[in-house]
Image: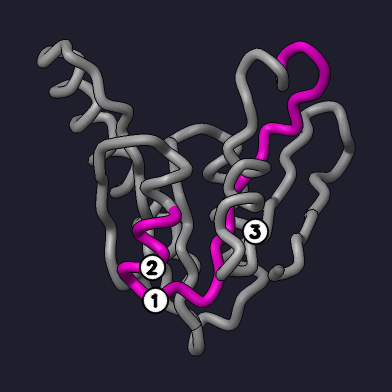
Amino acid sequence: MKILLPVDGSECSLKTLEWAARTFNPKQTEYYLLKVISITPDMIQVEYDVTDATKALNIAKHQLEEAGCKVAQIAYIFGDIVDRISDYADEIGADQIVIGSHGRTGLNKLLMGSVSIALMERCSRYPVTVYRNVEKAPTPKTVVSLQK
């Protein structure tokens, strides 16, 4: 099974990796780690973003490998987050996408948007599992969307 795991270096992303490592059979699963970098006209910012992406990807790779999982590929790409995740899933022939959610609600969600919700709406070819990380809840919840 090929699982695409978009990462951003956040605590939410790391908790999602931990959950995936515990949930999927390590002998039957290959992980593809992806960091999407938003395009900006500021070259200094781009250099920082690439450095940050490389660091986040290497941390995620190390975390999965420490848990006995196989990381088939790590990559960073530029563009719209949801579009590029969808394109990359097509490129690698993903069986599933697993992404974390910060569990924002209300005005925070409205202002910041939700990559996980947009991904579920646009990636109808792939099952999308959203691991919801909610700080106030005693244990994170897992929400699974069904393939359309």
- State the image coordinates of residue 99 (x, y, percent, origin top left): 58, 51
Give above or below for 78 relative to 26.
Answer: above
Q: Residue at x 56, y 69 (%)?
A: 125
Residue 45 sits in which quadrant? top left
Residue flagged by tag 2: what amino acid is it? Asp
- For mark 2, what is the residue? 90
Residue flagged by tag 3: what amino acid is it? Trp
Label 3's element? Answer: helix
Give above or below for 54 relative to 25.
Answer: above
Comparing labels 2 and 3, the label whose residue is closer to the camera: 2
Give above or below for 127 relative to 82.
Answer: below
Q: Start and end of the magenta stretch?
A: 86-108
- For mark 1, what is the residue? 93
Residue 17 sits in which quadrant? bottom right
Q: In this figure, which colouring scheme has been used for the structure?
A: one colour
Label 1's element? Answer: loop
- State the image coordinates of residue 131 (x, y, percent, origin top left): 70, 51
Closer to the chain start, of discs 2 and 3, is: 3
**Mark 2–mark 1 distance (CA, rounded to whole Å):** 5 Å
Marks 2 and 1: CB-CB under 8 Å? yes
Label 2's element? Answer: helix
Closer to the chain start, of discs 3 and 1, is: 3
Say if the magenta span includes residue 118: no
**Mark 3–mark 1 distance (CA, rounded to whole Å):** 22 Å
Comparing labels 3 and 1, the label whose residue is closer to the camera: 1
Question: For residue 19, which numbered disc appears in the image?
Answer: 3
Q: Nearer the viewer, residue 48 or 136?
A: 48
Q: Quadrant of the C terminus?
A: bottom right
The residue positioned farthest toward the right in the image shown: 138
